[in-house]
Amino acid sequence: MSTRSITFLNNKNIDFKVKKYKHKERGAVYASQAIEFPLERTIKTLVVDMGSKGFVMVLMPGDKKLDLTRLAKKISVKKAAMADTSTAQRLTGYMIGGINPFGTKKKLPVVLEKSILNYDEIAINAG
């Protein structure tokens, strides 16, 4: 089965493995347990409204929480807010729980938590 994510990664010649699991609940904790992978290396993708600067995708380790105030300061906007479900799904083309930065409907800037770069291998939920 090929998805937009798989097609995107294949077209970019990016090495990856697909680990399938039954999606019984949303969230990095469940995904981490389902694929038996460390939570801090199981990455969640969040869509954030940066006001006048539009939307960004934020990649965060599953064991961390996004600090919207800190993100707003880094991006130089007054306020950052999580995108509502329908907006996130419309922008990405993925359902909540399967949003990922690969092959999205609309290209969005990606911001990532720097600790992700410490790992040779990570898991990203992908629809």
Image (spheres, rainbow, N blue to C red):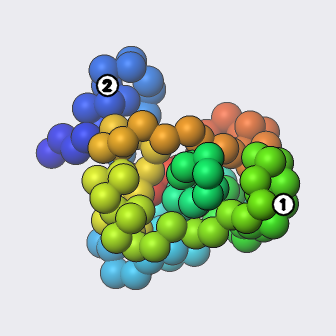
CB-based contact (under 8 Å), mark 1 and mark 2: no
Provide residue 109's location: percent of width, then percent of height: 56, 39
Which residue corresponds to mark 2?
10
Q: Residue furthest bottom?
A: 25
- Label 2: state its secondary structure: helix
Does any portion of residue 17 appear in the rendered image? no
Which quarter of the figure is the N terminus placed in? top left
- Label 1: state its secondary structure: helix
Q: Residue furthest left?
A: 1
Provide residue 96's location: percent of width, then percent of height: 38, 69
Provide residue 70's location: percent of width, then percent of height: 84, 60
Does any portion of residue 105 appear in the rendered image? yes
Which quarter of the figure is the C terminus placed in? bottom left
53 up-or-down from 35: above or below: above
Amino acid carrying mark 2 in the image = Asn
Q: Residue drawn at (39%, 18%), measured in percent from left and top?
A: 13
Amino acid carrying mark 1 in the image = Arg
Q: Residue furthest front?
A: 52
Q: Which mark is residue 116?
A: none
Please tell me in which quadrant of the rendered image residue 114 appears.
top right
Give me the C-alpha separation between circle 1 and circle 2.
34 Å
122 up-or-down from 70: above or below: above
Give 72 or 57, whichever is nearer the viewer: 72
Q: Is residue 111 left or right of residue 2?
A: right
Q: Of the residues under marks 1 and 2, which one precedes in the sequence?
A: 2
Q: Residue drawn at (34%, 70%), measured in percent from left and top?
A: 86
Question: Dot 1: within a 10 Å radius of its alpha carbon, few (fewer than 14), some, or many (20 or more) residues?
Answer: few
Which residue corresponds to mark 1?
70
